[in-house]
Image: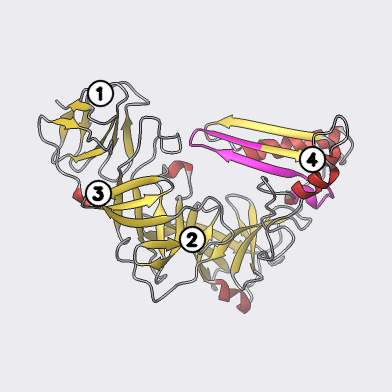
Amino acid sequence: MPNAGELLTPDSINEFEKNQTGPLGSGSYFADFGLGWDQVSVPQFAVRGITVLAKGGDTMFFHGLLYTAPKANLTVATIVAGLHRAGEISTAVMWAALADKGAVSKATTAPAALPGAAVIPPEVYQYKGKYGWGAPSAIVQVTFNPQKNTLDLELLRNGVFVPSSTLYYTSDGLFYDPVTKRSFSFAVANDGRKLIQQHLDDNGGMITTGESINQDDDMDTSEFNDMTWVPYNYNYWAYDFNLGKGLYKTGAINGSMGNIYLYSGAPQSLSLGDSAAYGLSDQYTSRLILPYALDLVDIKIIHKNGMKVLKTDGFEFTDAKTVPLLKKVEDIVIGNDGYNVARKVASETAFMSTIPAGGRILIYSPDGNNIFDSLMTGNETQTLKADSIIVFIGDPNAVFVTK
């Protein structure tokens, strides 16, 4: 039992601070997940002998991060709106607070000069391939240019790998990104998986930011390939991860047999790509192939009400190719089951509709971006291009009158 005035016993605190990730990582700073914590040892503090626990949380519009340094009795909580980075703010505030308490020196030194260019060793070329990047926000393809001694990253967008960034090999054995000022290297995990590691400082702090995608030649990806999916069970209060999101997409990962990607509709300005890689356990069901990634979901295709339906993260989506055309004047009636009703625009038109109480209208451009959400804006006439998709959301038997 805790002593008087204590919330937790020392044994409980030790358990909360314990690394719970098991033997998957390649080093001491690999994804130190704990009970309720994203990290139980934030690398840039750990190399200075300071234990900092971290827990983050994000939506489309807000970003939060909690840092706790138990032995220093310090906690930093940051909540920001928009595109600001809660991590950078929290880190700066924590360093300042630690310095104020005398836990670290306030002295600063000039950053070390960037090491000179060097020739990429032949053994590094084995790391060419496709990787899940981030947690798990992107899929990247890694290639090397021996003539320029560079690493070229291509990012998967709309099922195609497009050039993203070029990193330069330096004499300290790292690849340097001149845009982000970050350095990277490769490693092999305990399970043989190839990893991309980002170096956080000059003291050995690093995190693993990419893991190899291993192809499976035996799996049929045709049910998921080149598919665009329309919301089928969104509701009026569909949480804000879906506000402003575009249409979901799935497809086969080019050059990686048997694997698929799920693009979950995030605006590209807010994400590297928001595409996560999956394998298949059968023709219709995904399996996880990125054991180090966060926030992955189950994906499954079923047939329901005579339609092909994608189920993921509690939501259901229908095949965009089957959406009926919108009539010039039409009453849209939500069925007894409450499922969304979708219509496609045949040619450029001015669209307007009544919205019943508890109703909501989403409109997607021909390329799948969300261009109107009645929950966020007033109800007004929209000029829509051909192949735009309108999704009507409401209670059972609710009626929308289009004009």
Looking at the image, residue 50 sits to the left or right of residue 290; the answer is right
**Picture coordinates of residue 70, whole percent (x, y):** 81, 40
Image-quadrant location for residue 393: top left
- What type is the residue that disc 4 sits on? Ala
Residue position marked by numbered label 4 in the rendering: 69
Image-quadrant location for residue 349: top left
- What type is the residue that disc 3 sits on? Ala
**Picture coordinates of residue 32, whole percent (x, y):** 70, 54
The disc, 3 or 4, on the residue closer to the chain's N-terminal end is: 4
Residue position marked by numbered label 3 in the rendering: 320
User: Distance of mark 4 from mark 2, alpha carbons?
Assistant: 34 Å
Disc 4 versus disc 2: nearer the observer? 4
Residue nearer the viewer, 223 or 390 = 223
The disc, 1 or 3, on the residue closer to the chain's N-terminal end is: 3
Placement of 304 over or under 383, stated as above or below = below
**Picture coordinates of residue 255, whole percent (x, y):** 40, 70
Residue nearer the viewer, 54 or 205 = 54
Q: Secondary structure at mark 2?
A: strand
Task: Give the class, few, some or many, for how many residues have Cα within 10 Å of label 4's Cα (few <14, many ≥20).
Answer: many
Q: Which residues are magenta?
A: 44-65
Q: Secondary structure at mark 1?
A: loop
User: Distance of mark 2 from mark 3, alpha carbons?
Assistant: 26 Å
Q: Would you say residue 132 is visible in this rendering?
A: yes
- What type is the residue that disc 2 sits on? Val
User: Distance of mark 1 from mark 4, alpha carbons?
Assistant: 51 Å
Disc 1 versus disc 2: nearer the observer? 1
